[in-house]
Amino acid sequence: MNVQDMSLTLAQALLRSESTAESETPAGQKHPFERPPFTVTISREAGAQGTTVAAELGKWLDWPVYDQELINKIAEEIGRPSFQVRSVDEKHFSWLEDTLSGLFSEYHINPSAYLKKLIATVRGLGALGKCIIVGRGSSFILRPASTMRVRLVAEMHDRIQFIGRLRGIADREAARWIEKTEEDRTLFVKKNFGKDVAEPHNYDLILNMSRLSVKEAAEAIAQTLSLFEARRVALKVPETVAAR
């Protein structure tokens, strides 16, 4: 097998195993017709204010936000400092890079171990619902039926200005940071989930942050979410039918 396909195969196997586990409903648990509350996932171009919009939306909905918090949660579960987990966060490593990193770094974390824990953690959060997850392929990990998938984009010059202010760096350095971060995130999703992170059909709502304020974006997401929730109520299977 091509080593570049190994992470994709692993992710597919993990997602299939999770789906099988969900389909088996032990006695006393919820009926499979009963879906969990919605989760909002936010995919974002580098510099498109994904973290900022998620925080504003979290305040609007009174829902927890998992961005860096997701890294901290994974680090806690595997018993490693968060900076170690951050070194593999939303990055793709070839087999050679992973091997060399393991040989020469005392802070090495196997990307496959990170992927396993990431999928399990995101699925666990999705089972509870009523939360906001930023990036990490979460739009491709959770089921569309109980997930509102958002994508944030912005003009390059606006992203450069935002990152420059945020990180206190010059425009040229901000542009390089955006290019590298965008490449890492794109490869992470493509190699692990076989998806194009920029494909618009993968999302329910795409917002141009060059045209909207953070508050306006959060409001647009919240309003669309309310439509999703109202439609679910309207289409809910009657208990008498579900029990047959």
Image (cartoon, helix red, strand yellow):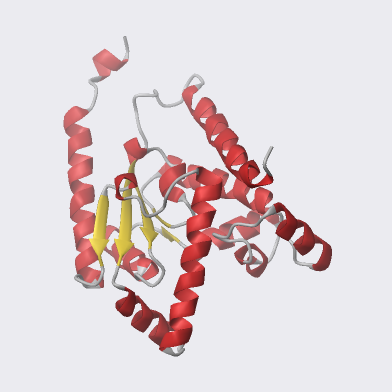
Say left or right for 16 vs 84. Answer: left
Above or below, 159 relative to 119: below
Q: Is 83 rendered above or below residue 233? A: below
Q: How many marks?
A: 0
Q: Nearer the viewer, residue 149 or 130?
A: 149
> Could you say which quadrant of the image residue 57 lies in?
bottom left
Q: Residue at x 35, y 83 (%)?
A: 161
* Residue at the far top in the pictured view: 244
Residue 142 sits in quarter? top left
Q: Nearer the viewer, residue 127 or 179?
A: 179
Near-viewer residue (45 or 14): 45
Horizontal side of 106 relative to 164 (left or right) equals right
Residue 90 location in percent, x, y?
54, 59
Q: Quadrant of the C terminus?
A: top left
Residue drawn where x is 62% and y is 42% of the image: 5
Quadrant of the image for the N terminus? Answer: top right
The answer to whether residue 121 of the structure is visible from this angle is no
What is the residue that sits farthest to the front in this orientation? 2
Query: Along the line of sight, which residue is nearer the eye, 84 or 111?
Result: 111
Q: Residue at x 46, y 71 (%)?
A: 179
Q: Is residue 77 visible?
A: yes
Residue 81 % position (x, y) = 68, 66
Residue depicted at x 44% and y 44%: 140
Question: In the rendering, at what x and y percent does residue 4 appear?
Answer: 64, 47
x, y percent for residue 176? 48, 78
Please determine whether, in this image, residue 75 is positioned above or below residue 200.
below
